Image (cartoon, grey):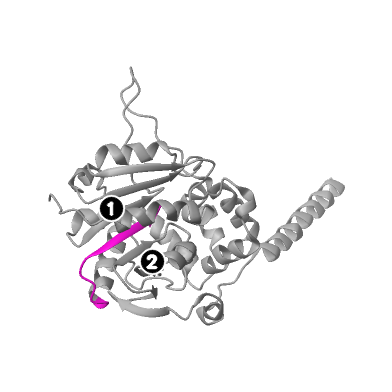
Amino acid sequence: MRRIVRIAGVGLGVVLVVSLILIAALYRADIPVAELKPKYFTPESKFVVVRGDSLHVRLRGQGPPIFLLHGSFASLHTWNDWEDSLSLRFRTISLDFPGHGLSGPSPHKHYSTDDYATSVLALADALEIDTFSVAGNSMGGAVAYKLAIRSGRVNKLILVDAAGAPAAAAAPGTATAQPQQRPWIFGWLSNPLTARLMTRLTPRFLFEKVMGGVFADQQKITPAMIDRYYELMLREGNRTATLERLQTPQTDSRDSLSMIHIPTLILWGEQDSWIPASHANRFAKAIPNSEVVIFPHVGHVPMEEVPVESFAVVLPFLQQPPAQSEK
């Protein structure tokens, strides 16, 4: 009996030691923003206080203004390539939403897509911008179309693999449509246990796995890109803010998409594993004055994966004279 107890004690001790080693190996401390600024704060960057939040904003170029809105877990740097080209003809305004990038957490918990839309309008006021175009990817796409619904100040809309498409029609003989399966990372962050662990145990390989699901062409994923997504998530307060953001109720505005009558360009990666390309047609069906372009062999972020090809579609769209709104 004593031998069994000793063996059990040794076994528990080994498990404890291994667990402590794993925790020590996976633990990642927050990174102070002062350490990240030299790497991610560019000469065109500035902090602008909007609604009590200090937002990292990047302003480039001169000409008609266009806001560029990133998706979940991303930052304004997702638009780097588009900005290089757009800023030769337009005034680009990109920003890190609260809880993302260098902006960090919101003291007032401004984490819903409605909050983000309100912050963009407030930022436009602060920059003395009246009317503007807007492009949004993923979550940023939902923010972009809410801006177009809520405000007559948007003159052109670009949705890039946008979240929040209308629900699919139910299959014949069924009462409801099959719900979309969310990416695994959202499942992890929806579980209270794994979510809390990830605010402290955040290994880099998890971000390698996330990036592998976002890009179709794995050769386009560079170590510097993974570092950027990873390090900015570790920005002090961002991991906790991400959990709070995902628990924040969202207003469903899908039934109001038909109110958008401004020119709308819908871009999608054919191999998007986060939001299927079929959602592009759902948006097109709901938004009257819209067109769809699908990029073959491309994933969730065409502006990063195929920046040249996607910009070649965006530029002529933006250069078309804006039609009068029918609102």
Which residue in the protein does label 1 denote? 145
Regarding residue 143, the answer to whether it shows in the image is: no
Quadrant of the image occupied by residue 30: bottom right
Residue at image point 18% right, 47% down: 259
* 131 inside magenta stretch: yes
Q: Is residue 1 above or below residue 140?
A: above
Viewer-closest of 294 and 104: 294
- Residue underneath mark 2: 97
Q: Nearer the viewer, residue 145 or 4?
A: 145
Say which mark, if any, is on residue 261: none
| Distance from Cα at disc 2 to Cα at disc 1 | 16 Å
Q: Is residue 228 left or right of residue 13?
A: left
Q: Quadrant of the N terminus?
A: top right
Q: Amino acid at mark 2?
A: Phe
Residue at point 40% right, 65% down?
86
Please state the horizontal and vertical placement of residue 122, each as a whole percent of the image.
25, 71
Local SS, label 2 = loop
Q: Counting other residues with Cα less than 10 Å from the Cα at mark 1, is it few (<14), some (14-19), or many (20 or more)?
A: many
Q: Is residue 222 above or below residue 92?
A: above
For the residue carrying disc 2, how many other residues have a C-alpha within 10 Å: few (<14), some (14-19), or many (20+)? many
The image shows residue 232 at horizontal and vertical percentages of: 52, 68
- Range covered by the magenta-colored residues: 126-139
Residue situated furthest right in the rendering: 3
